Image (cartoon, rainbow, N blue to C red):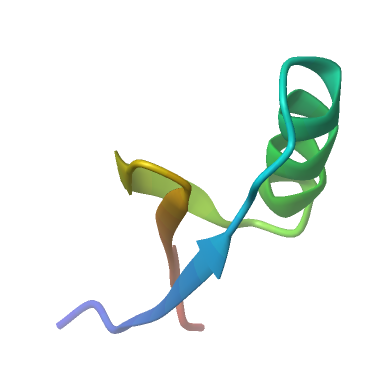
Amino acid sequence: MKRFEYKCVWIAGMGETTARILNSYGQEGWELVETCLFWHYFKRQLD
């Protein structure tokens, strides 16, 4: 069975700032699952 960890992050930047932050989470293995206003929900698989 696959196991995941989850993270909820407040990202209040606009345009390039948000893209830079999202890309850094992606490089760490986090997958963007959903956004709600400034809240961004991520998950990544545990080994």
- Taking the image as shown, residue 2 lies to the left or right of residue 9, namely left
Q: In the image shown, does 40 or 32 lie closer to the viewer?
A: 40
- The x and y percentages for residue 39 are 42, 55
Foreground: 32 or 1? 32
Q: Quadrant of residue 13?
A: top right
Question: Which residue is the extreme one toward the left?
Answer: 1
In the picture, the quarter occupied by the N terminus is bottom left
Q: Quadrant of residue 30?
A: bottom right
Residue 14 shown left or right of residue 8 in the figure: right
Residue drawn at point x = 68 percent, y = 39 percent: 22
**Relative vertical location of residue 5 with respect to residue 15 in this rendering, above or below:** below
Q: Position of residue 10 (x, y in %)?
A: 56, 62
Q: Residue at x 55, y 66 (%)?
A: 9
Q: 24 or 2, which lies in front?
A: 24
Q: In which image quadrant can residue 16 be found? A: top right
Please say if 6 is above or below 17.
below
At which x and y percent is residue 3?
28, 84
Residue 20 rendering spot, x and y as whole percentages = 84, 32
| Count of numbered marks | 0
Q: Residue at x 64, y 56 (%)?
A: 29
Residue at 46 percent across and 82 percent down: it is: 46
In the rendered structure, the answer to whether residue 33 lies left or right of residue 20 reads left
State whether residue 45 is above or below residue 29.
below
Between 4 and 16, the residue placed more toward the observer is: 16
